[in-house]
Image (cartoon, rainbow, N blue to C red):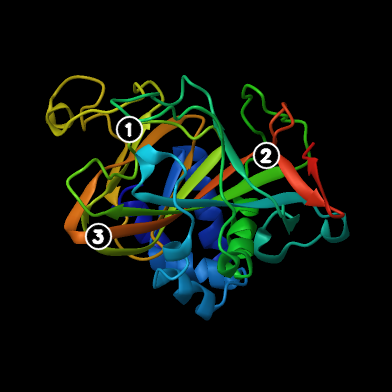
Amino acid sequence: MGNFGEMRLMRLRNDAQTLNLIKTQLADKTFAFIPGSIYRKILIDFGATLDDLSALECGSIHRITALDPDPAMYFRRVAIHRMLLTPDDDNSHDESHHRNSMKITEAGCKGLTQINENEIADEVEAFSRRSGTRYGSMPPLEYRRSSVPVAMAKLNAFMIPSTFHAMPNISNDSNTVINDQLLIRINKQSDMEETPSREGVHQDGCEISSVTLVGKSKITGGESRLWPLSTPAGNYNDDMFESSTGPYTKKKCLFDFPLCSNWDTIYFNDRVLKHEARPFDGERPAYRDVIVNFVRKPLSDGKDMKLENGEIISIE
């Protein structure tokens, strides 16, 4: 979304109009940029408290998030908080904020990502395989007890499309929508390849994705870029981006902008776009904290789990 769309959001005074414009841009243009001041206000409207927002902004939660278990991703802290969106029969006529009437619950167990090998470049250079099923660590209790996960899930419930794309190993007939919230800190401490998207241009294996900057320190760069679906998965260099030809030329790039302010957010349809976050640098040590939201239906293979009545069961 360009400056015009951002200005339209800034001028709106009606909360319902703001939400509807964002959803329309996501549906029609396949992505929408939300300035941090607006996104933060939306979260507050959906129940997030100032104290909980501040705890994320200061980095205290990302700082204690688990280290990535992959040795090649030694510079990353990451955890997955799984929220479940299901029809709420008791409030089927609730029109508040014009949001979908969905029941929001915490899954209570580990989340996972499952990305098809044709959506992400595997074994780029010397680092490990990125496709397939990857389980995440549970987030710190400070996040699970926060008001922010529910507020984000409520917004995501409003953003879900009426029809989901067909995907391999996805149960589109399920009444449940999974919202995995990934807390990610990228630490830049050396001249090694410490970068948000080491795999380069890719997809996330979900229907809707969003990336929200919640804090940073001493960084320059780190642009978020969106690409047509036809763009090859993988990495490219700056010369290729500045070139007038080739799949990675900036003429083909649909969005190229760094998330600069806390709560700056980019929503996009992961089924029709590819994306990446470019490397950043800065006075060492530098870091970048984000919350990435994945929204999709459950996996057909039964690997998605939730806690119910004290037992971990498969999500249907």
> 51 above or below 249?
below
The residue type indicated by label 3 comes to Ala
Could you tell me which residue is drawn at 67 percent across and 59 percent down? Answer: 98
Of tags 3 and 2, the one toward the viewer is 3
Q: Is residue 171 left or right of residue 82?
A: right
Of tags 1 and 2, the one toward the viewer is 1
> 30 above or below 168?
below
> 74 above or below 140?
above
User: Label 2 near label 1: C-beta < 8 Å?
Assistant: no
Q: Is residue 96 left or right of residue 60?
A: right
Residue closer to the observer: 175 or 11: 175
Q: What quarter of the picture does the C terminus occupy?
A: top right
Q: Answer few, some or many: residues within 10 Å of disc 1's Cα (few below 14, many 20 plus, some between 14 and 19).
A: many
In the image, residue 124 lies at what x, y percent? Answer: 32, 25
- Can you identify the residue that label 2 sits on? 162
- Can you identify the residue that label 3 sits on? 286
In the image, residue 176 lies at what x, y percent? Answer: 75, 43
| Circle 3: element type | strand
Could you tell me which residue is drawn at 38 percent across and 49 percent down? Answer: 76
Residue 200 numbered tag: 1
In the image, residue 262 lies at what x, y percent? Answer: 37, 66
Could you tell me which residue is drawn at 64 percent across and 59 percent down? Answer: 154
Residue closer to the observer: 193 or 150: 193
Could you tell me which residue is drawn at 73 percent across and 42 percent down? Answer: 305
Gap in Å between the C-alphas at discs 3 and 1?
20 Å
Gap in Å between the C-alphas at discs 3 and 2?
41 Å
The residue type indicated by label 2 comes to Ser
Task: Indicate which disc, 1 or 2, sits on the residue closer to the N terminus.
Answer: 2
Gap in Å between the C-alphas at discs 1 and 2?
30 Å
Task: Indicate which disc, 3 or 1, sits on the residue closer to the N terminus.
Answer: 1
From where the camera sits, is residue 158 visible?
yes
